[in-house]
Every structure is written in C-alpha cells, then in structure tokens.
Image (tube, helix red, strand yellow):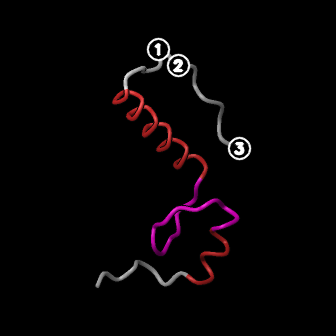
Amino acid sequence: MPPAPVAATEPLPTDADGIEAYNNQMASIFSKLSLDACEFCGRTFKPESLVKHLKGCRGPAMKK
C-alpha cells in the first residue's frame, strides 16, 4: 500500500495554472507509487491488469 500523503507545506493553488501544475504533480506521484511498468513496452498498469497485459505484449509499438 502506498504511503499516506505528506501534509501540504504550502497553501493549495487557487489559479487555473497552479491547479493544473498541482494536479499533474499529484498524478505523477500516483503513477509512480501505484502503477507497475511493463518490462517489454514500458506502459504502466494496475498490478492485476499488468498480469493480463504481459500475456499478449509484443514490446514497443512500431510507428507507421
């Protein structure tokens, strides 16, 4: 289980750009703590979904 969030040391942003930056930062932290990367293609999944994905993964997608 991921650790509990750290208490905010600064007030939460109130302007649109600040909120967007804060949301992006929190999404990045969430992904790093709760999603697992496929060793073949690098995509991230919930642990239970990664098991299913690995059965059919063929590595990085080829661009046309």
SS for dot 2: loop
Q: Are marks 1 and 2 in contact (CB under 8 Å)?
A: yes
Q: Is residue 23 left or right of residue 34?
A: left
Q: Would residue 9 be found to the left or right of residue 50 on screen?
A: left
Residue 5 painted magenta: no
Circle 1 crowding by C-alpha within 10 Å: few under 14, some 14–19, many from 20: few
Residue under numbered circle 2: 8
Question: How far apart are labels 1 and 2 at the CA level?
Answer: 7 Å
Q: Quadrant of the C terminus?
A: bottom left
Picture residue at 40% right of the left edge, 35% below the top: 20
Q: Quadrant of residue 5?
A: top right
The tag on residue 11 is: 1
Name the spot of residue 47 as percent of width and height, x first: 66, 61
Relative to residue 1, is residue 47 depicted above or below? below
What is the span of residues highlighted in magenta in the rendered image?
35-49
- In the picture, measured across the screen, residue 48 lies left or right of residue 41, that is right
User: On residue 1, which mark appears?
Assistant: 3
The residue under label 1 is which amino acid type?
Answer: Pro
Task: Work out which residue is located at the far left of the displayed protein and give it.
Answer: 64
Residue type at mark 2 is Ala
Q: Give whichever of 61, 18 is nearer the camera.
A: 18
